[in-house]
Image (cartoon, helix red, strand yellow):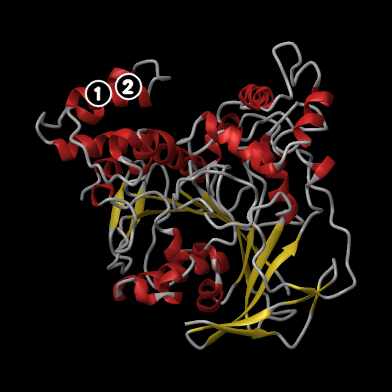
């Protein structure tokens, strides 16, 4: 994911208006009261801001999450929790731009059909939001799962987890082991049991290189910038002192200082391997077949890379692509060399993406640049992950989302950009139809049907044929505004060519 997200699925036994629920839910931690929300006259039970770990503040900053202490007084779960600490002045779609961010943020939200009860065996969708391990929260409007729960007849859980400085600062000691944001996810998942997974625009292959040393370097640079370390006193040789000093700084100060190092970056700290959670290189483990053998639904948007080139070079493209510059072939060649600079032979990629493009076809040249970016970071890794899973006999289903939302903030040349499908999965067009075209409301209903049918039955649809994806049969299903389940493609070459 650059900015990817994951839905983990399990089985549990267990114009909007709202009112308090007249019943209480008794959890292992204590009693909880939520409220009833009305989505187009369809009721949904909502529980907001349920804590799942102790607040990671004070001495617990940078440490693994600690189990929650039970409560006896009824918890009124009626207000959105604060977003985890993050900072950027840029209003990108994946950023929580609301005030009220906090380190005390380890809360989850639950959305449930009104008739859910013990023994109902409803499927549970467990959502881990995207944001490059740097931005986002479960209180963002796009992640309101009321419509998804109602129309899919499922229970939806959305979580917060620590990100950036607070989730991945490391001293490589138990006091700040790193990966604590990942441990947050695991604690929120409770028993860690899931039977299926949906991976949207990203896979674990992003962890193909170990981030331990880069994370230590990020930590040292941050500590020096706020007066907690020096060339002589480092996070490696004096971790206790450096961490103690870092814990004395405000969350806003740490987040803002670290942002200033690379203001337009969509990610900084990143998960590292070598601990109990991620013991080994993810790519090596995937090659060996060391993964949870379950059905997966995975896919990408058609124009994954368009947002990447705008955020990496806003002075050229504008933050939302509004500058729409002419990129000549020489400029494009240099950009593609930069994208594949770690390759043994970047020139072969220059030839692959630009070899057949006329020198004066500036739209195609620009498209191929962002296609190369999206392929290298998201699409190719998704394809390899899907092939690897299928090779071990697992059921894999692949989609390509090609619809450009009518209300998108991205410029028209950017196509169906990264993460544009999420709002349709969560039913935002159903909740707010006045912001969308009628066919987009219908598309949202169809995507909810696909996602929840997969959660319940392990197949995306019972009403049309969705072929299983494999290296031998790389067939995917196009999802667009006129989706009927009858548009197929083969990839990844056909994806790269876009067929717009």
Q: CA distance from mark 2 to mark 1?
A: 6 Å
**Depicted 15 relative to depicted 163: above or below:** below
Considering depth in this image, is 385 or 58 the residue closer to the camera? 58
**Depicted 21 relative to depicted 278: above or below:** below
Which labelled disc corresponds to residue 337? 2
Using the rendered view, name the quadrant where residue 134 is placed.
Answer: top right
Q: Residue at x 67, y 62 (%)?
A: 81
Using the rendered view, name the quadrant where residue 190 is placed.
Answer: bottom right
Q: Is residue 330 left or right of residue 398?
A: left
**Residue 385, image x, y percentages:** 49, 41
Using the rendered view, name the quadrant where residue 349 is placed.
Answer: top left
Considering depth in this image, is 227 or 46 the residue closer to the camera? 227
**Residue 375, image x, y percentages:** 37, 37
**Depicted 497 relative to depicted 449: above or below:** above
Q: Residue at x 68, y 50 (%)?
A: 185
Q: Is residue 379 left or right of residue 160?
A: left
**Depicted 43 relative to depicted 345: above or below:** below
Q: Residue at x 33, y 66 (%)?
A: 485
SS for tag 1? helix
Q: Residue most toward the top? A: 232
**Residue 465, image x, y percentages:** 37, 65
**Residue 229, image x, y percentages:** 73, 20
Considering depth in this image, is 332 or 245 the residue closer to the camera? 245
Q: Please state the total of marks drawn on the protein image.
A: 2
- Does the rendering let one see residue 269? no
User: Within 10 angstroms of label 2, few (less than 14), some, or many (20 or more) residues?
Assistant: some
Whether residues under marks 2 and 1 lie with C-beta atoms below 8 angstroms apart, the answer is: yes
> Which residue does the numbered mark 1 point to in the structure image?
333
């Amino acid at each position: 994911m650059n900015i990817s997200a994951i839905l983990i699925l399990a089985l549990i036994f267990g114009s909007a208006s709202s009112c308090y629920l007249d019943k209480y839910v008794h959890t292992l931690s204590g009693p909880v009261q939520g409220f009833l929300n009305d989505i187009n006259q369809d009721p949904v039970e909502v529980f907001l801001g349920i804590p799942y770990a102790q607040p990671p503040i004070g001495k617990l900053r940078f440490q693994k999450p600690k189990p929650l202490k039970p409560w006896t007084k009824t918890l009124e779960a009626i207000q959105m929790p604060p977003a985890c600490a993050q900072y950027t002045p840029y209003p990108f779609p994946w950023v929580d731009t609301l005030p009220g961010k906090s380190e005390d943020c380890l809360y989850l939200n639950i959305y449930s059909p009104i008739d859910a009860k013990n023994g109902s065996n409803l499927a549970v969708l467990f959502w881990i939001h995207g944001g490059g391990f740097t931005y986002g929260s479960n209180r963002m409007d796009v992640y309101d799962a009321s419509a998804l729960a109602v129309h899919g007849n499922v229970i939806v859980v959305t979580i917060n987890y620590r990100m950036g400085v607070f989730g991945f600062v490391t001293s490589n000691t138990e006091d700040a082991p790193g990966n604590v944001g990942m441990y947050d996810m695991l604690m929120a998942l409770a028993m860690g049991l899931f039977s299926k997974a949906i991976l949207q625009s990203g896979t674990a292959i992003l962890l193909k290189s170990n981030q331990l040393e880069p994370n230590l370097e990020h930590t040292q640079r941050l500590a020096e910038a706020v007066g907690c370390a020096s060339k002589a006193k480092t996070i490696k040789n004096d971790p206790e002192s450096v961490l103690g000093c870092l814990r004395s700084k405000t969350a806003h100060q740490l987040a803002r200082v670290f942002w200033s190092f690379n203001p337009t970056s969509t990610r900084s700290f990143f998960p590292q391997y070598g601990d109990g959670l991620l013991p080994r290189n993810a790519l090596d483990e995937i090659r060996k077949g060391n993964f949870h053998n379950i059905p997966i639904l995975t896919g990408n948007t058609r124009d994954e890379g368009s947002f990447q080139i705008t955020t990496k070079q806003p002075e050229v493209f504008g933050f939302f692509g509004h500058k729409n510059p002419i990129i000549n072939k020489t400029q494009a060649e240099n950009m593609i060399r930069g994208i594949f600079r770690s390759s043994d032979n970047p020139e072969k990629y220059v030839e692959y993406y630009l070899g057949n493009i006329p020198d004066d076809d500036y739209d195609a040249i620009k498209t191929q640049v962002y296609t190369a970016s999206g392929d290298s970071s998201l699409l190719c890794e998704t394809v390899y992950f899907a092939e690897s899973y299928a090779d071990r006999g697992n059921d894999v289903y692949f989609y390509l989302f090609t619809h450009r939302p009518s209300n998108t903030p991205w410029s028209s040349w950017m196509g169906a950009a990264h993460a544009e499908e999420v709002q349709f999965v969560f039913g935002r067009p159903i909740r707010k139809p006045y912001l969308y075209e009628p066919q987009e409301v219908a598309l949202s209903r169809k995507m909810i049907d696909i996602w929840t049918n997969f959660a319940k039955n392990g197949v995306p649809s019972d009403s049309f044929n969705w072929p299983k994806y494999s290296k031998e049969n790389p067939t995917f299903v196009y999802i667009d505004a006129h989706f009927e389940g009858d548009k197929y493609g083969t990839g990844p070459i056909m994806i790269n060519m876009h067929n717009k």
